[in-house]
């Protein structure tokens, strides 16, 4: 059941609302900073930009803003197909109005509006996964992070192909390399200027290096120098993003990082779960922080960490089903009965044929009963229907062989994303 709040109006923010948005953001995310600092660092180009529209919840009696969030116009790639995606960022509620369901009210209004626009997908980075799970979002994004000694990385000879980034010469080729890689990956954003600007913006300690072969850019890495936590007085390098279009570029990036061993003590490598990186390191254990136990359990060394990242939510099911490619197999039809805490119960029947899903009007006896959260997990290849029936997270009526066909049809690499917001 959706939230009905009397006395609160949700509207698009205007440039004159900037001081109120800045104050709400300050109280929610950076209470030790001044409004002037936040306005300069977060809104130096203005409040609303192409691809970003702030929303404001206003108290009807006082006219004061009590909450805000930003809607982002995004597009993500899944199995080579672009999906128009509504991004949610900066959900902030005034301290004195928290616990009054205002954030829930704003998000419910947003989801209903996105369905009316036939937007298939929504995405956000949660402060609390549980809160958004109640609203139908599913945790689908994992980040793997390895903190290793630079000297334990392989010193590949391809490192000599790495050159410093020059915006005048490299920016178009760098962005093209990202886009080419994004179309082959799941979950990567099809970036616009709003996403590129902070990635490439010069900052103290941030460096960008490119891998070239015969003058052609085939990969790059964005890194940030920082003080090493494990050993005071030493440097660490945090790899914020990397792209390699071939194995030479990948080896060049790793070899370059290894060659920093005389200056850099540790390398923090952020990556997607399928990356072969952990098999290429000489020692499979992390550089330990002060007073940290050397082993996780028994003779098992501490090594990588898993970050619980972004969440997705299916919104317009018909659009989402029509867009998503599926693996080739013999045709079959399934009915999905979907419970949705915002949009209500829905039923959609899909004919899986010719590598696509075609919604049909007539339900069939084979029925998957699921929440929109679990449907999202299945849809993006994160979970398998047979597994979720076994754990009783979803229910199924019909021929069990069709469940295995569903698993095969939706099989894909789970989504990953370099961008955070």
Image: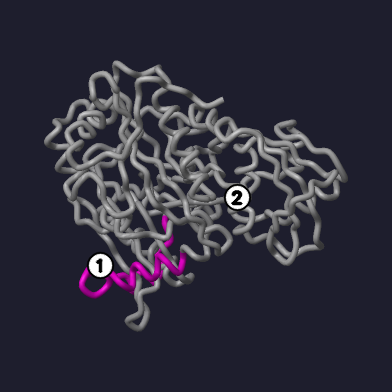
Task: Check if residue 177 falls in the magenta segment.
Answer: yes
Is 419 on the left or on the right of 17, as rendered?
Answer: right
Residue at numbered disc 1: 165
Q: Callout 2: 10 Å neighbours few (<14), some, many (20+)?
A: many
**In which image quadrant can residue 343 be found?**
top right
| Element carrying mark 1 | loop
Tell me where residue 13 sits by quadrant. Answer: top left
Residue at position x 56%, y 37% in the image? 300
Q: Nearer the viewer, residue 55 or 380?
A: 55
Q: Residue at x 35, y 20 (%)?
A: 7
Q: Tell me what residue is drawn at x 37 percent, y 44 percent.
A: 71
What is the crowding at mark 1: few (fewer than 14 residues within 10 Å), some, or many (at least 20)?
A: some
- 16 vs 268, left or right, is left
Residue 329 location, quadrant = bottom right
| Residue linked to disc 2 | 380
Left/right placement of residue 55 relative to residue 244 reads left
Question: On screen, 155 above or below 345?
Answer: below
Residue 305 appears in the picture as rendered: no
């Amino acid at each position: 059941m959706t939230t009905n709040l009397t006395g609160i109006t949700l509207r698009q923010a205007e440039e004159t609302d900037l001081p109120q948005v800045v104050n709400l953001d300050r109280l929610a995310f950076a209470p030790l900073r001044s409004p002037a600092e936040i306005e300069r660092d977060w809104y130096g180009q203005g409040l609303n930009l192409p691809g970003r529209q702030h929303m404001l919840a206003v108290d009807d009696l006082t006219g004061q803003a009590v909450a805000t969030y930003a809607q982002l116009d995004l597009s993500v790639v899944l199995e080579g197909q672009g999906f128009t995606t509504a991004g949610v960022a900066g959900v902030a509620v005034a301290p004195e109005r928290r616990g009054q369901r205002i954030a829930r009210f704003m998000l419910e209004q947003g989801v209903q509006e996105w369905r009316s626009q036939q937007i298939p997908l929504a995405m956000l980075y949660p402060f609390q996964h549980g809160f958004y799970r109640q609203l139908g979002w599913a945790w689908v994004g994992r980040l793997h992070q390895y903190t290793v000694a630079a000297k334990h990385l392989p010193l590949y000879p391809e490192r000599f192909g790495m050159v410093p980034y020059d915006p005048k010469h490299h920016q178009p080729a760098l962005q093209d390399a990202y886009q080419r890689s994004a179309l082959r990956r799941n979950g990567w954003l099809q970036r616009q200027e709003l996403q590129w600007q902070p990635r490439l913006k010069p900052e103290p300690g941030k460096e960008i290096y490119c891998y070239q072969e015969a003058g052609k850019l085939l990969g790059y890495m964005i890194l940030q120098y920082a003080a090493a936590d494990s050993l005071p007085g030493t440097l660490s390098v945090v790899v914020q993003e990397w792209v390699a279009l071939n194995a030479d570029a990948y080896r060049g990036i790793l070899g370059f990082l290894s060659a920093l061993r005389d200056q850099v003590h540790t390398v923090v490598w952020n990556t997607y779960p399928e990356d072969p990186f952990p098999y290429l390191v000489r020692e499979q254990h992390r550089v330990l922080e002060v007073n940290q136990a050397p082993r996780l359990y028994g003779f098992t060394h501490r090594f990588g960490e898993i970050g619980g990242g972004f969440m997705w939510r299916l919104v317009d099911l018909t659009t989402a089903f029509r867009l998503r490619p599926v693996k080739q197999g013999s045709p079959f039809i399934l009915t999905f009965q979907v419970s949705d805490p915002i949009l209500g119960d829905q039923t959609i029947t899909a004919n899986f044929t010719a590598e696509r899903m075609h919604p049909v009007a007539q339900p069939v006896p084979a029925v998957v009963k699921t929440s929109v959260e679990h449907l999202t997990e299945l849809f993006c290849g994160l979970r398998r229907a047979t597994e979720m029936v076994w754990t009783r997270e979803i229910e199924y009526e019909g021929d069990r062989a069709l469940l295995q066909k569903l698993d095969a049809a939706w099989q894909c690499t789970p989504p990953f994303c370099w961008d955070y917001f």
